[in-house]
Structures are given as structure tokens and as C-alpha cells.
Image (cartoon, helix red, strand yellow):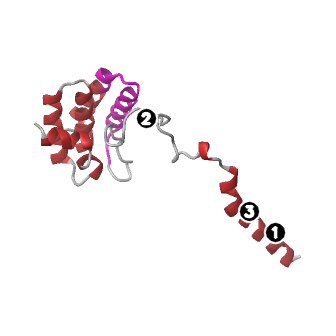
Amino acid sequence: MRRFSKWIGFFLMAALVFANPLWVNAEEDPHKFKAGESPYWFKPGEGPLPLPSNKFLKLSEDIRLHNNRGIDEFLTQNFRDALDHFEMAAQLDPNNGILAYNEAITLDRLNRHREATQRFQQAKDLARGNQLILNSPVLQSHLSHP
């Protein structure tokens, strides 16, 4: 009986490991979006960034709330309200590179490029090695063409 239960367990584990990809078709794989089907209307590096969890960066809930609401407004292309939320979050933590970046990316969408360039420079100075900020094509274009 013990031998039989080992074979059943082995068979079930093999079925889970090998059969799982067969049950998922290409349309359900989130990494295989076709052009124009992404839930985001902007390209990577052209939108706001979420804050890291409290495990990595202790921030007040007000800052997190305003940043999350700003991201939600940005995703619905309501840039004025997004900017309000990002500015409120940045006032609560003026030395946070992500908040400066989110403000700058929103100012860029509002065609306030001079202000965006200033905030991008601040975001770069406050990035602390954050490659999502430093490698942003929008940041790079603003700082290479002031």
C-alpha cells in the first residue's frame, strides 16, 4: 500500500508540473500581450511608479494613499488630479525620488515641460540608484534636451 501511495503522489506531482502549461492558452498568459491589448496605455518607463512596500521603505499611509490615488488618476488620464495627489505626497516626503519622478512624469503629460525638467532633475538626484527612474526614456529626453 505504501508503494502504491508513493506512485499516486508521484503521478499527481508530475501532472501538476507538466500538465499545467497545457491548460493555459496563449491569450491567458499575461506576458504575451499583443500590441494594443496591454492594460496600460503607456510604454514602460513612461508612467508613474508605485512605492516599495513598508518592508523596504517605511512611509506614512498618507503618502502611500496619495501616491496610489495619483497612479489611479494617471491611468485614467486625469492628469490634473493625478498631479494634485503626487504633489500632496511629495509635500509629505520631499526627499523621495519616486514621488518627484511621478510628479515630473505627470507634468510632462500636462505639457508643462520646464517644470517637468526641474522635477526630473530632482528625481534623478534623489533616485539613490533606482534604475526605473534613472533609465526612464522620458527623464533622459528631458535632461538631455533642457
Q: Which mark is first along the chain, 2 or 3?
A: 3
Q: Earlier in the sequence, mark 2 or mark 1?
A: 1
Residue type at numbered disc 2: Tyr
Q: Amino acid at mark 1?
A: Ile
Q: Which residue is mark 1?
A: 8
Front residue of 83 and 47:
47
Displayed quadrant of residue 108: top left
* Comparing labels 3 and 1, the label whose residue is closer to the camera: 3
Question: Which of these two is toward me, 35 or 72?
Answer: 35
- Which residue is at 20% across, 44% downward? 140
Q: Which residue is mark 3?
A: 15
Which percent across, then down, holds residue 75? 40, 29
Q: Residue at x 57, y 47 (%)?
A: 29
The answer to which of 89 and 118 lies nearer the viewer is 118
- Give the residue furthest to the right: 1
> As drawn, which residue projects farthest toward the front?
35
Residue on which disc 2 sits = 40
**Numbered range of the magenta stretch:** 58-82
Where does residue 99 sit, x and y in percent of width and height? 26, 38
Residue at 60% over, 46% down: 26
Kindly state the secondary structure of the residue where label 1 is placed. helix
